[in-house]
Image: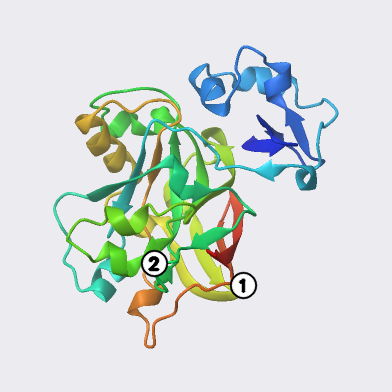
Amino acid sequence: MKLCSFTHKGKPGYGLVTNAGIIDLGQQLADLPTLKHFIKADAYAKAAALSGNKVDYALDDVTLQPVIPNPDKIICVGLNYHDHVQETGHTVTKYPTLFPRYQGSQVGHGSPMIKPLESDKFDYEGEMAVIIGKAGRRISKENALDHIAGYSCYNDGSIRDWQSHTTQFMPGKTFAATGGFGPWMVTADEIPDPSVLSLITRLNGAVVQQTTTDLMITDIPALIAYCSTILPLLPGDVIVTGTPGGVGFKRNPPLWMKDGDTVDVEISGIGILSNPVVAEK
C-alpha cells in the first residue's frame, strides 16, 4: 500500500493513497493521529480493511508533506555509490559516511525546494529513503529488512559551498526547505528486495542521474545494522541511502538548480518525487 502525510485546509493528516485519491486514516483511526503513530502500531491491517472506502480527498485537494513530517532522526549516507565516489575524488571507506538532516530542511512532493539567499550552488541528489517500522538496537544484517516499514524517494538538495566550509557536510545539507521527501511511502511488503530498483533524477526533464540500487557500496541491511549500533532506530526514523554519480557540482560546467527549475526523482516501484525550485526572496 501507499501511505502519505498531507495537510488539507491547513489541517495535518495522513492517509492511504488509492487510484481514486486519499482515504483519510487520521479521521478513521483517531487513536493514531500521525503516520509515525500508525507505523509504530503496525496498523496496516486496519488500513487494508478501509481500502474499499470512498476517498476523502483527491490528490490535488491536499498539500503533500514529507512522508514522515516529524521523524526522531534523519540519517543520510554520503558517498555510497562507486561512480559518485570516483567523480568526487574520494576513496571507498571501510565504514559508511553519515550526516544528519533535520525535519525543517525538507518539504513534500510538489512543494518548492528553496535556493537560499546565501548561495547559487544548489545541487540535486536523487536517493532512496528507508523508513523504519520496528524499533531496534544492534539489529543484525540478517534481520534488518524486518525492521523496515517502507520506502520513498528523496532529493538531498545540497548547498555545495556551505557543504565544503569544513570536512563536515552538515552545513550544506540542512538549509531550510532544501530537501524533498515523497510523494508517499510504499510499504515493504510491496518491495521485498530493495536492491533491484532503478533510480533516475531529472532536471527540467533531462536525465542527470541514473542507477540501480544494487550498486550501493553499503547495502540497506548493512546500513541498518551500522546505524542501529550507534543508537536505537525508532518507528518513523529515516535513512537516506546515498546518491549516484552525475551530481551538478562535478559537471563541466557545473549544473546548478535555479529559480524556475523542476527536479524529479523517480524510483521504480515507488513513484516520482517532483519539486519546483524557487529562489528565496
User: As drawn, which residue projects farthest toward the right?
Assistant: 54
**Could you classify mark 2 by the number of other residues whose Cα lies within 10 Å: few (under 14), some (14-19), or many (20 or more)?**
few
**Could you classify mark 1 by the number of other residues whose Cα lies within 10 Å: few (under 14), some (14-19), or many (20 or more)?**
few
Name which residue type carries label 2.
Answer: Glu
- Please determine whether, in this image, residue 139 is positioned above or below residue 151: above
Name which residue type carries label 1.
Answer: Gly
- For this view, does 110 lie left or right of residue 19? left
In primary-sequence order, the first of circles 1 and 2 is: 2
- Please determine whether, in this image, residue 133 is positioned above or below residue 129: above
User: As drawn, which residue projects farthest toward the top?
Assistant: 31
**Residue drawn at the location 31% of the way across and 37% of the way down:** 224
Could you tell me residue 1's position as x and y percent? 64, 34
- For this view, does 104 lie left or right of residue 64? left
Colour treatment of the image = rainbow
Could you tell me residue 157's position as x and y percent? 43, 60
Location of residue 61 by image quarter: top right
The residue labelled by disc 2 is 118
Q: Find numbered disc 1 in the image and state the secondary structure of the residue it sits on.
A: loop
Q: Find numbered disc 2 in the image and state the secondary structure of the residue it sits on.
A: loop
- Location of the C terminus by quadrant is bottom right
- Please determine whether, in this image, residue 114 is positioned above or below residue 228: below
- Please determine whether, in this image, residue 238 is positioned above or below residue 25: below
The residue labelled by disc 1 is 260
- For this view, does 111 lie left or right of residue 180? right
Label 1 vs label 2: CA separation? Answer: 18 Å
**Residue drawn at the location 60% of the way across and 22% of the way down:** 44
User: As drawn, which residue projects farthest toward the bottom?
Assistant: 253
